[in-house]
């Protein structure tokens, strides 16, 4: 006499595990796909700020311009800031302050990295120019949460990045007149 219940149990386990396996594969694929950075709007430049993991994991790197918070960078996070062409000065501060001056040009994307170095009481932020190669070489970067962004203009929100990547909205053609005149 054969007992068939184990075969049913195996099928049930395989059926239950399939969605989890698919989700794990999708997550792994997302990790391996490069981050899409849209082109800056015409006549403007942009800066991609990022923070690799490492020392000072619990210390944020709050990027400010003209005394206003643009966004905070936690470990493994990035944000994109569209900027008018010209000189921009960004500061980061904990127990020490560091400043980065960048000359932004129209239609250009620049990169800046913020790392946390050893400090006396708390980590010291270090903001510096970076390259796209450094940005692309940093594993598992994710866009900062909207809650970490400053209150005003500056860091692009996820929906703004998605819209920029989608391209310009199609131009609707004017409808043809219903009664053409001879």
Image (tube, rainbow, N blue to C red):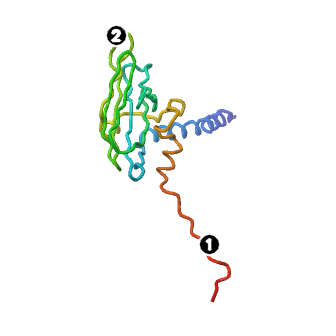
Which is more foreground, mark 2 or mark 1?
Answer: 1
> Which quarter shows the N terminus?
top right
Q: Any mark on residue 120, and which?
A: 2
Q: Is residue 13 above or below residue 162?
A: above
In percent of width and height, residue 90 lies at: 36, 31
Q: Residue at x 42, y 34 (%)?
A: 78
> Which quarter shows the C terminus?
bottom right
Q: Is residue 116 above or below residue 29?
A: above
Label 1 element class? loop
Label 2 element class? loop
Q: Any mark on residue 175, and which?
A: 1
Left or right for 98, reference 60: left
In percent of width and height, residue 162 lies at: 50, 47
168 or 182, nearer to the observer:
182
Left or right for 146, reference 112: right
67 or 62, nearer to the observer:
67
Left or right for 168, reference 66: right
Q: Residue 55 appears in which quarter of the rendering?
A: top left
Kindly give the residue lying farthest to the top in the view shown: 121
34 or 82, nearer to the observer:
82
**Which of the two discs, 2 and 1, labels the residue nearer the N terminus?**
2
Q: Residue at x 47, y 50 (%)?
A: 164
Q: How many marks?
A: 2
Crowding near the residue tagged with mark 1, few <14, some 14–19, many ≥20 C-alpha atoms within 10 Å:
few
Kindly give the residue lying farthest to the bottom in the view shown: 182
Is the C-beta separation of discs 2 and 1 under 8 Å?
no
Crowding near the residue tagged with mark 2, few <14, some 14–19, many ≥20 C-alpha atoms within 10 Å:
few
């Amino acid at each position: 006499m054969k007992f068939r219940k184990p075969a049913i149990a195996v099928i049930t386990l395989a059926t239950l595990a399939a969605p989890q396996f698919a989700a794990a594969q999708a997550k792994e694929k997302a990790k391996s796909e490069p981050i899409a950075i849209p082109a800056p709007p015409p006549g403007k430049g942009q800066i991609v700020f990022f923070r690799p993991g490492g020392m000072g994991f619990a210390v944020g790197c709050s990027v400010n311009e003209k005394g206003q918070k643009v966004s905070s960078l936690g470990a493994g996070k990035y944000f994109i800031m569209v900027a008018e062409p010209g000189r921009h000065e960004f500061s980061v501060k904990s127990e020490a302050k560091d400043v980065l001056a960048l000359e932004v040009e129209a239609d250009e994307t620049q990169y800046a990295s913020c790392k946390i170095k050893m400090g006396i009481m708390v980590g010291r932020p270090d903001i510096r120019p970076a390259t796209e190669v450094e940005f692309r070489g940093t594993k598992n970067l994710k866009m900062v949460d909207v809650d970490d962004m400053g209150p005003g203009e500056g860091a692009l929100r996820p929906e703004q990045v998605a819209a920029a990547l989608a391209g310009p909205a199609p131009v609707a053609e004017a409808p043809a007149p219903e009664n053409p005149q001879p």
